[in-house]
């Protein structure tokens, strides 16, 4: 596997993470205030889409781009893979969303992902539900 570009950053767990959404996964800079964000898997993130390097955004806008989101917490690793698209704007200053569908908006990181929040192992979700869990996130474009 040859990586064109890799970006690593950190976020934190939260007791309000449920990770039960069936079509999306979200990483946010915000603190959760309710259980409504059932796609959220990481909070207080160091980065949102608008913070990503321009080179990453450029590569990810290729229709042939394969985008990965690697989530590591408490020794557990989950990989989410999807596709890039020319219409990705990377404009959100708050979050990033991986989608199983082809829907694109300013919050979309990747489309046609192979996993949503509900697909994560429940062992991983338990780790993400602790506010002291430091989550390592790695974005890859290949």
Image (cartoon, grey):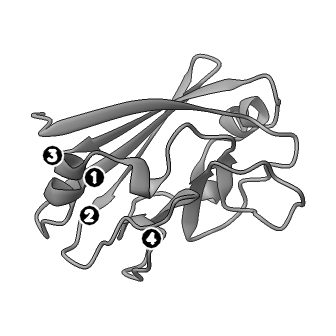
The CA span between labels 4 and 3 is 19 Å
Which residue is tagged 1?
A: 67
Where is the N terminus found, in terms of image quarters?
Answer: top left
> Do tag 1 and tag 2 residues touch (Cβ < 8 Å)?
yes
Question: Callout 4: helix, strand or loop?
Answer: loop
How many residues crowd mark 2 within 10 Å: few (<14), some (14–19), many (20+)? Answer: many
The CA span between labels 2 and 4 is 10 Å
Q: Position of residue 135 (x, y in %)?
A: 60, 28
Q: Position of residue 9 (x, y in %)?
A: 46, 31
**Residue 100 marker:** 4
Which residue is tagged 2?
A: 83
Query: Who comes first in sequence, dot 4 or dot 1?
Result: 1
Query: Who comes first in sequence, dot 2 or dot 4?
Result: 2
Given residues 6 and 101, the one toward you in this image is: 6
Residue 76 falls in image quadrant: top right
Query: Who comes first in sequence, dot 3 or dot 1?
Result: 1
How many residues crowd mark 3 within 10 Å: few (<14), some (14–19), many (20+)? Answer: some
Given residues 118 and 45, the one toward you in this image is: 45
**Residue 142 marker:** 3
With 37 as the anchor, is 26 left or right in this view? left
Question: Callout 1: helix, strand or loop?
Answer: strand
Residue visible at 15% across and 35% down in the picture: 3
The CA span between labels 4 and 1 is 13 Å
Residue visible at 41% across and 48% down in the picture: 51
Residue visible at 88% across and 56% down in the picture: 33
Question: Callout 2: helix, strand or loop?
Answer: strand
């Amino acid at each position: 596997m040859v990586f064109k570009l890799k970006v690593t950053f950190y976020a934190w767990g939260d007791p309000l993470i449920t990770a039960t959404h069936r079509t999306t996964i979200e990483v946010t800079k915000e603190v959760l205030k309710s259980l409504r964000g059932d796609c959220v898997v990481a909070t207080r993130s160091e980065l949102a889409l608008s913070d990503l390097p321009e080179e990453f955004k450029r590569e990810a806008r290729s229709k042939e781009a394969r985008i990965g989101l690697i989530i590591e917490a408490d020794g557990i690793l989950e990989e989410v893979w999807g596709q890039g698209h020319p219409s990705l704007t990377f404009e959100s200053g708050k979050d990033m969303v991986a989608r199983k569908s082809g829907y694109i908006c300013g919050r979309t990181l990747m489309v046609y992902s192979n996993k949503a929040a509900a697909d994560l192992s429940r062992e991983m979700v338990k780790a993400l539900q602790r506010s002291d869990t430091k989550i390592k996130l790695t974005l890859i474009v290949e």
